[in-house]
Image (cartoon, coloured by chain):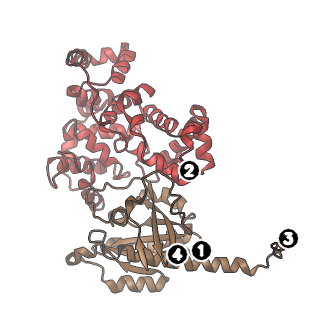
Chain colours: A brown, B red
């Protein structure tokens, strides 16, 4: 059971108390310039394609509420500028991320070859075991494809990443990929909790002593 | 709407135009002896019909062009580095996409934007192209031809905001820290709140400063801020930033509705139109 809550559910800027998520994750979007990070986020929020988005300067951020498997999730989505020189700024925010979405453009071999570079940035900057989603965007431009699906799959397997091809323009696999990411983030969180529980707790306080 | 230009009575506008014409025609004399007066007139707003010319005088790009006759044409004829051309080309339709000058792919506005940005990568090959330069160049092109816009861009990148667009973006990060320490003096409440929420200045000021507010403020305010910026330099950018922060987060009343980190970020992303309005903003700056 997957339902995506619409973009306009709450007026911008008002604290969303009504939704009060069960889980909250920080997700950082990285990848070369022009691969479609901002367009993907726009599609995720507004469910339309906006061809007039300006190039991201620095970092941008938004919150997305989703219900997955009957649980409420809030994703804090950090959109970063792709151009190389901004990496000195973006790098500082790797550590805060629970998940990283690494995007390339299937019509650009160059953006795909940079994926390895981005992986090394993540390795260097993020917490160990951070959940990574590899996304090949622009499946709507099939005629201009330069990166075969299998290559993305192979790379994902090699580095144990979740992998999807998607299209911000058509909406293909946009929420599907986010749902997969959420599920994995949750598995990861549960594992951490379990580990924490293995440490013996102080005995529980007796309940209802007056009975 | 807040984007509408402040109504200046026609008579006042004509008076201002003739004052500015007199200044531009006797520029060296005015600069040497009556700089205060120039500053005051920039604060009042440069008449739209003379804005492009005035910016070139104020920035010194006019002199720069005269010292480098033919340089732009020379750079314009060179092919340029493919790695820069690719990024620039992909950015052309992403600057002020609703402005009539830049609306059509391959139209004059986009072509000139390409020429100016490409010329810069050839002029300063070690710096190349930074994506935040495109909106700056686009605003300039709305006011002057490509060659003039190029030299004005050079002045901005070298004299006004040195290092902002360079490889490691160190200057912008440093200015973020400076802005934050100035905020401590200007609005301790806002400073305390941002410190408590651990919101790094880089999160809200990067676009403000790198694009000189051209993507943040309503258009009429952008022009007024740039008028002052060309006259007084980067301190105007700092002051605008401080005004925005102070009037967004500067009282306990204002903070009531944005207590968390993310509510605060959201508030800074969607600033109140009231505080960005031309008359209010310029007066506060």
**Circle 1 chain:** A
- What residue is disc 3 on? A210
Secondary structure at badge 3 equals: loop
Residue A134 can be seen, yes or no = no
What x and y, as percent, mark residue B210? 40, 45
What x and y, as percent, mark residue B168? 47, 53
* Residue depicted at x 39% and y 77%: A176
The reply to whether the C-beta atoms of the residues labelled 2 and 1 are less than 8 Å apart is no
Who is closer to the viewer here, A76 or B13?
A76
* Residue depicted at x 30% and y 58%: B84
Q: Earlier in the sequence, mark 3 or mark 1?
A: 1
Secondary structure at badge 4 equals: strand
- What residue is disc 1 on? A128
- 2 vs 1, front mark: 2
Q: Image quadrant of residue A64?
A: bottom left
The answer to whether residue A37 is above or below residue A68 is above
* Residue depicted at x 40% and y 58%: A81
Q: Earlier in the sequence, mark 3 or mark 4?
A: 4
Who is closer to the viewer here, B71 or A191?
A191
Residue B111 can be seen, yes or no = yes
Tell me the number on the disc at residue B199.
2
Dot 4 surroundings within 10 Å: few (below 14), some, or many (20 or more)? many
Tell me the number on the disc at residue A131.
4
Separation of disc 2 and disc 1 at Cα? Answer: 24 Å
Separation of disc 3 and disc 4 at Cα? Answer: 48 Å
Q: Are marks 4 and 1 on the same chain?
A: yes
């Amino acid at each position: 059971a997957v339902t995506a809550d619409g973009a306009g559910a709450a007026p911008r800027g008002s604290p969303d108390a009504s939704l009060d998520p069960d889980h909250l994750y920080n997700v950082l979007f990285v990848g070369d310039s022009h691969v479609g990070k901002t367009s993907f986020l726009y599609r995720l929020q507004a469910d339309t394609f906006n061809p007039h988005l300006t190039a991201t300067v620095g970092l941008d951020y938004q919150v997305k509420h989703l219900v997955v498997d009957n649980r409420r999730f809030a994703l804090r989505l950090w959109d970063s500028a792709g151009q190389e020189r901004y990496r000195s700024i973006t790098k500082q925010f790797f550590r805060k991320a629970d998940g990283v979405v690494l995007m390339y453009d299937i019509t650009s071999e160059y953006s795909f070859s940079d994926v390895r570079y981005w992986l090394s940035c993540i390795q260097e900057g993020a917490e160990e075991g951070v959940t990574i989603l590899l996304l090949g965007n622009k499946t709507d431009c099939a005629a201009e494809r330069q990166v075969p699906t299998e290559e993305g799959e192979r790379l994902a397997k090699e580095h144990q990443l979740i992998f999807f091809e998607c299209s911000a323009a058509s909406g293909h696999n946009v929420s599907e990929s986010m749902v997969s990411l959420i599920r994995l983030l949750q598995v990861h969180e549960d594992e951490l909790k379990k580990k924490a529980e293995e440490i013996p707790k102080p005995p529980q306080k007796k309940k209802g002593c007056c009975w | 709407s807040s984007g509408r230009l402040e109504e200046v009575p026609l008579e006042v506008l004509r008076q201002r135009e003739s004052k500015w014409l007199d200044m531009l025609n006797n520029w060296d004399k005015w600069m040497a002896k009556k700089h205060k007066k120039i500053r005051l007139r920039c604060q009042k707003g440069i008449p739209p019909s003379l804005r492009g010319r005035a910016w070139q005088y104020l920035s010194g790009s006019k002199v720069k062009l005269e010292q480098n006759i033919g340089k732009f044409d020379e750079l314009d004829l060179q092919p340029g580095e493919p790695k820069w051309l690719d990024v620039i080309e992909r950015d052309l339709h992403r600057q002020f996409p609703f402005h009539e000058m830049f609306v059509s792919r391959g139209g004059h506005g986009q072509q000139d934007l390409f020429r100016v940005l490409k010329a810069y990568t050839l002029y300063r090959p070690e710096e190349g192209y930074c994506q935040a330069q495109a909106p700056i160049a686009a605003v300039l092109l709305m006011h002057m031809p490509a060659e003039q816009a190029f030299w004005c861009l050079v002045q901005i990148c070298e004299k006004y905001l040195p290092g902002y667009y360079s490889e490691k973006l160190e200057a912008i990060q440093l200015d973020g820290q400076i802005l934050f320490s100035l905020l401590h003096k200007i609005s301790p409440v806002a400073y305390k709140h941002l410190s408590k929420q651990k919101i790094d200045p880089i999160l809200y000021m990067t676009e403000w400063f790198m694009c000189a507010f051209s993507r943040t403020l309503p258009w009429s305010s952008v022009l007024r801020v740039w008028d002052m910026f060309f006259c007084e330099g980067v301190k105007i950018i700092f002051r605008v930033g401080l005004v925005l922060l102070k009037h967004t987060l500067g009282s306990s009343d204002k903070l009531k509705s944005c207590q968390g980190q993310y509510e605060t970020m959201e508030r800074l992303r969607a600033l109140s139109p009231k505080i960005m309005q031309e008359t209010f903003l310029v007066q506060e700056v």
